[in-house]
Image: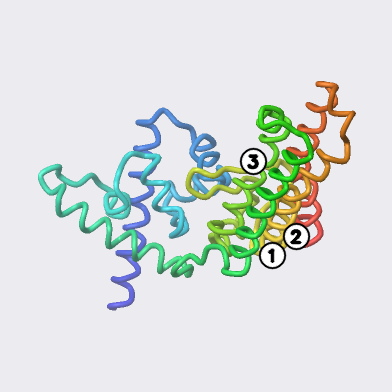
Amino acid sequence: MAEKELTAVNEWDKAKTGAFLAQLRREKNMTQKDLAGRLYVTDKAVSKWERGLSMPDASLLLPLAEILGVTVTELLRGERIDEDASMERGEVDALVGQAVRLSSGEGPVRRGSPLWRRRFGLCVLAAAAETLLLVLLGRTWEELLFVDYSLVVILALVFAAHFCCFARETLPRYYDENQISVYYDGAFRMNFPGVYFNNRNWPYILRACRVWLLALAVGWPVVYLLLGGLLTSLPVRMALVMAAVFSLFVPIAVAARRHS
């Protein structure tokens, strides 16, 4: 009897949460496809949530609540909480958020590694030394600060800093349950149509990004030095910049498809 009552409550909670989710979505003038697109899941998954057939993955509750303009507590309860209880609601939401992260099976998110942080630091020093060497060999600071040199080196180091020091070593579980071609981590976004990120290929993609970006940051000053006279042509310089910037997509595609 107790098990039946518990099951009934759980089913009622899912139905109530689903109806509340559908109401909030309509209030935002969003279709199921719109909401699915912002969460990088399918519209069929959203439809199941709203019909009470399933619940969103625990790791999706925080972004889902943010998109719909409610707290996780309100989303789970299937109703808005009185504004007079805002202080208590905030405290409860913090606890729920922590529980959500733990229940998703992720635990603390491990980011970067000491080895790759050291390698990144060495590459920063190497790129700085190479830039100084170019100046000693006759290049001017004005020339090096021009977009075709500085843009490539700076972008390579900025992206390398993310992947070496701050990128998560494993993806949230919903990447494995849906075909997601966008990697997003806070403000960082990387959209790659045709490539689906998951925890099978992510370690290889991460390694490919780290190796390629560090090699680009250290190798670009060498390329700049060896090409010499070719760099007097602006179209050639811009073509080289575009080739260097978009070259990152090649190792990502190779790693993703080889290990999918």
- Between residue 159 and residue 98, name the one nearer to us: 159
Q: Which picture quadrant has residue 76?
A: bottom left
Name the amino acid type tagged 3. Leu
Name the amino acid type tagged 2. Ser
Among the two numbered marks 3 and 2 on one chain, the one whose residue lies closer to the N terminus: 3
Name the amino acid type tagged 1. Arg
Tell me, for residue 200, which label it has, or none.
Answer: 1
Number of the front mark, 3 or 2? 3
Disc 2, SS: loop
Number of the front mark, 1 or 3? 3
Q: CA distance from mark 1 to mark 2?
A: 6 Å
Q: Residues within 10 Å of mark 2 (few under 14, many from 20)?
A: some
Q: CA distance from mark 3 to mark 2?
A: 28 Å
- Between residue 225 and residue 252, name the one nearer to us: 225
The residue sitting at the top extreme is 234
User: Which residue lies at the image location 33% right of the left edge and 73% below the top edge?
Assistant: 4
Tell me the colour scheme of the image.
rainbow
The reply to whether callout 1 and callout 2 are in contact (CB within 8 Å) is yes
Residue corresponding to mark 3: 155
User: Which residue lies at the image location 77% right of the left edge and 43% below the top edge?
Assistant: 220
Tell me, for residue 260, which label it has, or none.
Answer: 2
Q: How many marks?
A: 3
Q: Where residue 17 appears, x then y in whole percent?
A: 34, 51
